[in-house]
Image (tube, grey):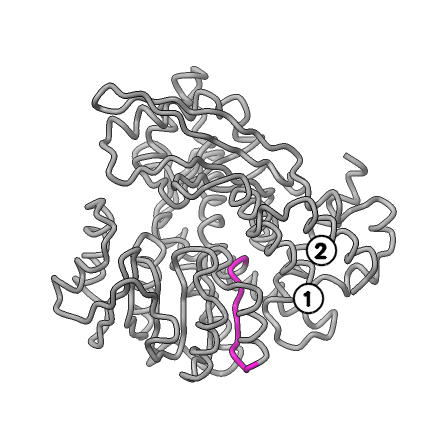
Amino acid sequence: MNAYLASVLENVRTKHGNEPEFVQTVEEVFSSIEPVIEKHPEYEKVDLLGRMVEPERMFTFRVVWCDDNGQWHTNRGWRCQFNGAIGPYKGGLRFQKNVYEGIIKFLGFEQIFKNSLTGLPIGGGKGGSDFDPAGKSDDEVMRFCYSFMNELYRHIGSSIDVPAGDMGVGGREIGYLFGAYKKLTGVYENGVLTGKGLSYGGSLIRPEATGFGATYFLREVLAHGGESIEGKTFCLSGFGNVAWGAALKITELGGKVLTLSGPDGYIYDRDGVSGEKIDYMLEMRASGRNKVKDYADKFGCDFVPDKKPWGNVKADIYMPCAMQNEIRIEDAKAMVSLGVKYLNEVSNMPTTNEALEYLQQNGVLVAPSKAVNAGGVAVSGLEMSQNSERLAWSKEEVDSKLQGIMRGIHNQIIEALDTYGMGYNLVAGANLAGFKKVADAMIAQGIN
């Protein structure tokens, strides 16, 4: 490894050893960008990599809220404005009890390159809280969101930082956060948050966008090898908006979804998740029970408790749509033994670096999350454009633009791989293409 690259990576490991998710994503990006670093020795002089792995700013704050019984609670909130070289910071808010500073930094670092690949002028950021909205009443969630925004509003704006939803932050939470922002600032600045409801500035197909975009990217990958989605079988994890959107589009394009998962286990539907079964996914999410077993009970299919489908169900294509690091080395070995051909990463960093390396060495084509799941932020960017122009595009217009963006991401990756002679390694190509654009912008803007 290039000496400068290695020294920055070692520094990250030393300083952030208690934040394994952040270290892992830096290692994964750095594993691909050595050809760029070798061609640009000037990067070391200005310590480009050292700057890139440090957030421009990071806010930590307390969030105090009252439950329906009059009991007060204190949670922590964060916003990481990681890199604004190509535009205002952009990235979701995650409300989940396992959230801590390292998770926010990992997600923010990934967001830099994901946003770069979209071709839209948006930088990378992320935020959230260790608050868990599951099981909370609407009033409790509203009180929390108002308290959370009471600090966050000082640091965001349509030309500064534009948060969106993520795990635990859906349309309900975005609505309360926007209402709080409007009350605190006295301004109807509808470009300050994305993922809004259609009645107050949201975009059509935003809930489906990540799943749709992931499927459109996969379509490009398969077409590159002379194949198509039609007739392929799929294993999905999760059953929220992302898995729902993916199941919709996969089915529409002639594929068959065999599995969904939740915290309680996974379902295996040999007949395929389609029609009313896809609609029922929305009911499961809205129920707040967070149990995928409800699907098995309703439709009479297999339920396997306390496991994910990886390596347990044979399918042509695996699409993790849930959490980081849900595919580990033992899963990767089982996948190879089952003959899985493709891993289309939809959730952020769903595969450990060890598992990723094993899959690639054993002939599984991996499409990386920073390319695959860019559809969500892409449509968020399109929402920002509609807000700024006071327009509301049709579903067909938004969908067409999304397809064009995902095709463009694939083309950027191909161009980067051709430039550096790296074959069809999509992981390396995504890192190279995303990194180079941000690096060029940072160099052009001087030391800051």
371, 291: nearer the viewer: 291
Direction from residue 102 to residue 314 in the image, left or right: left
Direction from residue 27 to residue 409 in the image, left or right: left
- Residue sitting at x 53%, y 47%: 107
Count of residue discs: 2
Amino acid found under the numbered disc labelled 1:
Ala
Amino acid found under the numbered disc labelled 2:
Lys
Residue 370: image location, x then y, percent: 54, 57
Q: Is residue 401 magenta?
A: no
Contact between marks 2 and 1 (CB within 8 A): the answer is yes
* Crowding at mark 2 (Cα within 10 Å: few <14, some 14-19, many 20+): some
Q: Which mark is residue 416?
A: 1
- Residue sitting at x 44%, y 51%: 376
State how far apart marks 2 and 1 are (Cα).
9 Å
Q: Which mark is residue 436?
A: 2
Residue 98: image location, x then y, percent: 42, 44
**SS label for mark 1:** helix
Q: Which mark is residue 167?
A: none
What's drawn in magenta, residue-wise?
362-370
